[in-house]
Image (tube, helix red, strand yellow):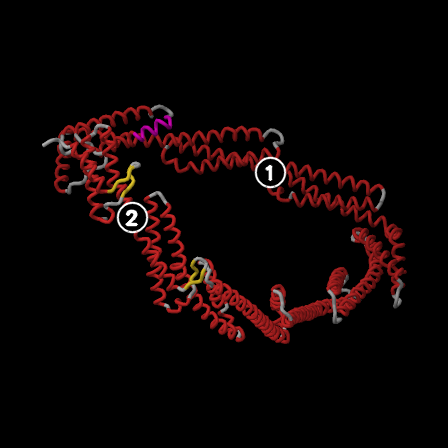
Amino acid sequence: MVRTSVLMLIGFLVFASTDAPAAPPAAGAAKSIEEASKRLENARAALTTAVQRIEQEPPRGADLDAALAAVEALKEALNAGASFETEDLEYAKSVLAARKQLRTDREYVDERRAKVHIHDYRRRIDSALAPLNERMSKLGQGDPGSKAMDEARAAVDALEKLTEEGRPLKSQDPKFSSYLTDVEATVARHRKTLDERWLQLSAQKQRGLLDASRKSLASALADLGKAWSDEKFTAADKATAALQKQLEEGKPLEVQDKAYRADADKARAEVTQARRQMDESVVQAGVSRVKVELEPAHEELRASAKALRVKRPTPEQLAEAKTAAFVGRKLVDKYEPQAARSQAIGQYLAEVKNTLVEVEVVLQVRTLDAARAEVMQALRNIEKRAATAEQFEEAKTALVVLEKTLETVHVKNPAISPAAADARQLLRDGRATMERRRYEVDLQQQRVKVDEARKNAAALVIQIQKETPSPAQLQEAENAVKQIGAVLEVGAPFVKKDRDYALYAKETKERMADLGERINRRKIVLAAADARVQLASRLTTTKEKLEAAKGISSTDGDVETASKSVDEVMQMFEANAALERQDAGYAASAERARAEWLKLVEALEFAKQARALRRLTGEALGVASKASEAAASSTDLRKKKELYASALEKLTACQDEGARMVKENASLATVDVLVGGTPTQPQEVMAQCAQKAEALQAPQKRADVELRFQDGQRKAYDSAKSLLSKGRKSEALSQLNDCIAEGRILENRYPDFKEQKFDIGGASMSMLELIQVCAKERKALQPAP
């Protein structure tokens, strides 16, 4: 059966390979069947070993990772040899077995990894459950305290969170599912235990507080029953209120704890009994006891009420009435609880209250009247034309005092209601008046600030018109105009609120623009005046420099300086071009100066040509004369030749360039040229250059011939002699040939100098004689025919 299955698989692969287009080889594909087989066997062996290692309980994490890597390695080995499955039957069988192993071992590895995860999760739950069980066992021992209860509840919450996170793993392992169900039941049991223990402790604590309040009430009632006193009655009343408060706080526990509910019912009955006993004590004490302390204060109140009925009570009477009202109010409040328990005490206390209220009403009305008077006086002060900030603060404070006074009076009392209504109206009117006057004063002050800024700016602008202002004064005037704008910006909100101020602000902006224009015109006038002075000064300086450049002894530096000065005048025209459009006076001056400048430009051009003519003629003649003198006295033939050539070049330029310049500009013929300190006409100087050049022809030619003789014929002769002294005859023969050849060339080129004697090592010899000497010595060296 296995063989048949393998053959069917191979056949299927063959048909699939013929129908499907050829796929490119996978990355890392084996190069041969042997390599693929070896790789497959190694991967299978490695996977088998890795699976054996994870069979231990519990498997290590590193072994699980190695097993997963081995599964992937086997999968890659199968992919690498996929192309050989249809080529070799034995390899196909190996592949089939390997694929079966891959499926089986991969499922086992995944299962082991899942179980390890469940095992780790179970350990986490166990590590949280064990301390929780220990903590819960301690909660039943005595009073654990609120901290231990909170810690236990936090531990239950943490364990419950762990169980919720582990619920998805139930489907993977029945044992873990059963385990997790047990843990969830334990969590529910612990939570119920915590709730019951908390209820028990809370009820126990509340019961203790309730017992303490009941004992305090019993003690206070016992003291009150022995002998009456206000202090004992107050203590009993406070103890009753404290017990009632404890009952209200523990009311939620009554539903959950029957024992506590029974104690609460007893306490509630005790409160009722205590109130009944306190009422009986008040009745037994009677009104006479209350009158002993309260009647003197009542008499003081009656006296104060009588004193206050006059039209103008004295300050002392008002002060006494305030003191009597304060004492009476305290005593009335003190006996108010007893009045609720005794009708007789209540009737007497009502009489005292009537007198007290009469005094308080009169005092409150007078206090209101005083506060109203302060407000009205403060409002009158701010209605003045020059209201100050302090007066506004006083009015604000007076309104606050009136408002606070209204909060303390009995506004519903008919005797106070009219005064209170007037005070409230005064508050509204006073605030409106303050707002209106604040706006009016701010507007007035704003106009004053604008007026001051305008006056300051106008004064500074007038000042710069009368005298020649400094840059600082001009800047100060500009800043003053800008300050007007800054002040107007501050008052911008008034523009929308006040039509008159809006018109005033508009007119001020126009005035501001006018002042700015006047400053600009003044700056233009000053700039034009300064530019005229600078232009005139620059023209004068340029004329002086041009005169220096035109002088007979001027230098190139003088011409260059004059040229720069002329350019600077042009730059001044360009820099102040805007002024010509802005100031007619400066425009006229600039036009006249421009005409003068054009003449200076022409004069400068002539000065440049004159200077060039003097440099090419007179100065060239002087330089050539010095060069010829140096050449005549020089013993260095090369230097002599160069000096003669330089002198002839200068003299030739003197003739040719000088004639050309005079021809192009006939005016240059009248220019004086300095020659040897004597002014000379250019034509005469050029004639001297021609004479001098002609005179230098002969010495220059002689120097040239002598240099050629020394460098050519004599040099070859001296070299031949040196070579002969060393016995190098063939080389010496070549040099003698050169001596004869160079001599014949010189003889033909300079026939006038063939008899000329030249110095040769202390002897004097012509080029023909040297040719003969060289020929004779050459003949001696030549072999016989």
User: How many marks overall?
Assistant: 2
3D distance between C-alphas at marks 1 and 2: 143 Å
Q: Is residue 432 visible?
A: no
Q: Is residue 184 left or right of residue 516?
A: left
Q: Which mark is residue 271?
A: none
| Residue 668, picture quadrant | bottom left
**Residue, disc 2:** 702
Q: Which residues are magenta?
A: 59-69
For the residue marked with disc 2, what is the amino acid? Arg
**Residue, disc 1:** 199
Q: Is residue 66 magenta?
A: yes
Q: Point out the residue furthest to the left here.
A: 785
| Residue 228, picture quadrant | top right
Q: Is residue 409 visible?
A: yes
In this view, the residue in front, 697 or 332, is 697
Position of residue 555 relative to residue 63, above or below, is below
Q: Is residue 185 magenta?
A: no
